[in-house]
């Protein structure tokens, strides 16, 4: 659990510094495999089926999946 929390905080910090980062660059910078990051993102997204926290959203641009902080995440990071 502590590792997941640390990875969550590291991802939020990374996106706070570089919003719109590609998922592959995020994997590399965090030292995670793509499947590990996707599992982490499942809980941080806005999916009601997965009871996501709505902190990170993704968009596809020219075949690349990019990660963005939501307004909710930005507000949390400022507190």
Image: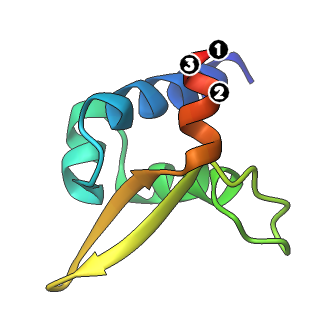
Residue shown at the point (69%, 16%) measured from the top left: 2
Q: As drawn, which residue projects farthest toward the bottom?
A: 62
> Looking at the image, do the residues carrying marks 2 and 3 touch, with CB atoms under 8 Å apart?
yes
Determine whether the residue tagged by mark 2 lies in a helix, strand or loop. helix
Towards the viewer: 70 or 30: 70
Residue shown at the point (56%, 23%) measured from the top left: 77
- The crowding category of the residue bearing disc 2, from other C-alpha atoms within 10 Å (few below 14, some 14 to 19, many at least 20), is few
Residue shown at the point (40%, 54%) measured from the top left: 68
Q: Check disc 1 and report the residue beneath it.
A: 79
**Mark 2 → mark 1, Cα distance in angstroms:** 5 Å
> Looking at the image, do the residues carrying marks 3 and 1 touch, with CB atoms under 8 Å apart?
yes
Determine whether the residue tagged by mark 1 lies in a helix, strand or loop. loop
- The crowding category of the residue bearing disc 3, from other C-alpha atoms within 10 Å (few below 14, some 14 to 19, many at least 20), is few
> Looking at the image, do the residues carrying marks 2 and 1 touch, with CB atoms under 8 Å apart?
yes
Towards the viewer: 26 or 56: 56
**Mark 2 → mark 3, Cα distance in angstroms:** 5 Å
Q: Check disc 2 and report the residue beneath it.
A: 76
**Residue 42, quarter of picture:** bottom right
Whole-percent x, y for residue 21 in the image: 24, 51
In the image, residue 40 sits, relative to residue 5, either above or below, namely below
Whole-percent x, y for residue 4 in the image: 63, 29
Q: Which mark is residue 56?
A: none
Q: Is residue 75 left or right of 74 when viewed as pictured?
A: right
In the image, residue 34 sits, relative to residue 9, either above or below, namely below
Q: Check disc 3 and report the residue beneath it.
A: 78
Whole-percent x, y for residue 46 in the image: 70, 65
Q: Is residue 25 left or right of 19 when viewed as pictured?
A: left
Whole-percent x, y for residue 10 in the image: 44, 24
**Mark 3 → mark 1, Cα distance in angstroms:** 4 Å
**Residue 18, quarter of picture:** top left
Quadrant of the frame with the C terminus? top right
Q: Is residue 9 left or right of 10 when viewed as pictured?
A: right
């Amino acid at each position: 659990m502590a590792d997941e929390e640390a990875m969550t905080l590291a991802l939020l910090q990374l996106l706070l510094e570089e919003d719109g980062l590609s998922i592959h660059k995020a994997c590399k910078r965090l030292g995670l495999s793509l499947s590990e990051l996707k599992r982490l993102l499942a809980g941080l997204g806005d999916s009601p089926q997965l009871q996501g926290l709505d902190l990170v959203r993704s968009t596809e641009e020219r075949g690349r999946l990019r990660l963005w902080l939501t307004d909710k995440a930005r507000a949390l990071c400022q507190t």
